[in-house]
């Protein structure tokens, strides 16, 4: 899933560790999400949405595979 997490985090001058502490996940989880190797759980996505004051759809974009 594509995301704008790294940009949003940088705009707020947060490290991966700081963001992880705020939303209750590990730094490795933030790194994996930013590299699009891992999709966050729904509760984690909601916490990010609340923190950045954005709808989840503005942080994460799901592209359907074309058949």
Image (tube, rainbow, N blue to C red):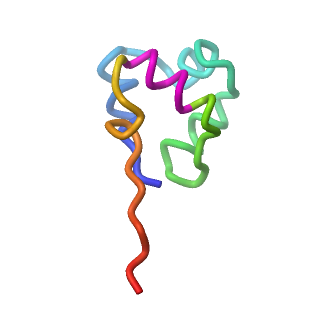
The residue drawn where x is 40% and y is 34% is 6
Residue 20, x across and y down, in percent? 61, 22
**Type of secondary structure dominating the magenta stretch:** helix
The residue drawn where x is 64% and y is 15% is 21
Q: Is residue 46 magenta?
A: yes
User: Compared to 19, does 61 lie above or below?
Assistant: below
Q: Give the left or right position of residue 15, taking residue 6 as reference.
A: right
35, 45: nearer the viewer:
45
Query: Dividing the picture into quarters, in which one does residue 63 lie?
Result: bottom left
Query: Dividing the picture into quarters, in which one does residue 17 lie?
Result: top right
28, 45: nearer the viewer:
45
Residue 15, x across and y down, in percent? 49, 20
Q: Give the left or right position of residue 2, taking residue 32 as reference.
A: left
User: Compared to 37, does 27 lie above or below?
Assistant: above
Region rendered in magenta: 45-52
Q: Residue furthest bottom?
A: 67
Residue 39, x across and y down, in percent? 58, 48
Q: Give the left or right position of residue 46, taking residue 58 as reference.
A: right
The residue drawn where x is 59% and y is 12% is 22
The residue drawn where x is 38% and y is 50% is 61
């Amino acid at each position: 899933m594509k995301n704008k997490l790294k940009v949003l985090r940088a705009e707020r001058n947060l490290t991966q560790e700081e963001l992880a502490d705020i939303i209750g996940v590990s730094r490795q989880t933030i790194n994996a999400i930013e590299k699009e190797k891992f999709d966050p759980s729904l509760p984690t996505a909601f916490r990010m949405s609340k923190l950045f004051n954005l709808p989840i759809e503005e942080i994460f974009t799901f592209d359907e595979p074309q058949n």
